[in-house]
Amino acid sequence: MSGEPIIKGADWVLTDELGPGAPDGIYAVECMTCTARSPLFDNDAHPVAVWAIQHTAQQPDHDLFLARAEKHWRVVRRRHEDESPGPAPQKPVVAFLDRAFGPAFVGLMCLCTALTGYLIALN
């Protein structure tokens, strides 16, 4: 199952993969000081944020991270107007969460960065 189109070509469409087993997102961070990497987590950025904070708590000068968020995409043949309709459109709640999750992840990372600075200031 695929979601709303990301890019449409003449005969092909690139979409988010929403089929069984496909995670909404895969999250990880990498320390920019020592290149230590968090484990990968499906569908939840919170454990990655906790890993980054714990890494900085163990090594206070390691406070800059590269955050990664990955999604699965699928290319499907474009349905033309004269063809029968495809799958039902994405439900409004799911579409809202999909649009809102990206900014929420950025906000979470900003919060983690601020918290890291606060924890360092306490020492």
Image: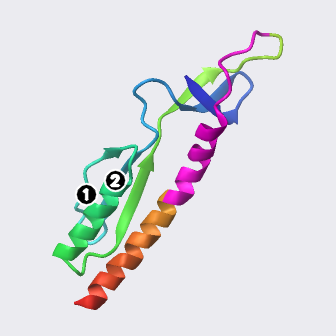
Which is more N-terminal, label 1 or label 2? 2
In the image, residue 94 sits, relative to residue 85, either above or below, namely below
Q: Are marks 2 and 1 in contact (CB under 8 Å)?
A: yes
> At 26% across and 72% down in the image, what residue appears?
33
Q: Which numbered circle lies on residue 37?
A: 1
Q: Where's residue 6, x and y in %?
A: 65, 38
Packing grade of label 1 (10 A; few <14, some 14-19, many >=20) is some
Query: Depth check: 54 or 64 in front?
Result: 54
Q: CA distance from mark 2 to mark 1?
A: 7 Å
Query: Depth check: 91 or 66 in front?
Result: 91
Quadrant of the rendered structure where residue 68 is?
bottom left
Q: Where's residue 98, x and y in %?
A: 57, 44
Q: Which numbered circle lies on residue 28?
A: 2
Verify whether residue 99 appears in magenta.
Answer: yes
Q: Which numbered circle lies on residue 109?
A: none
> In the drawing, does residue 23 fall left or right of residue 80?
left
- Which range of residues does the magenta coloring cover? 83-104
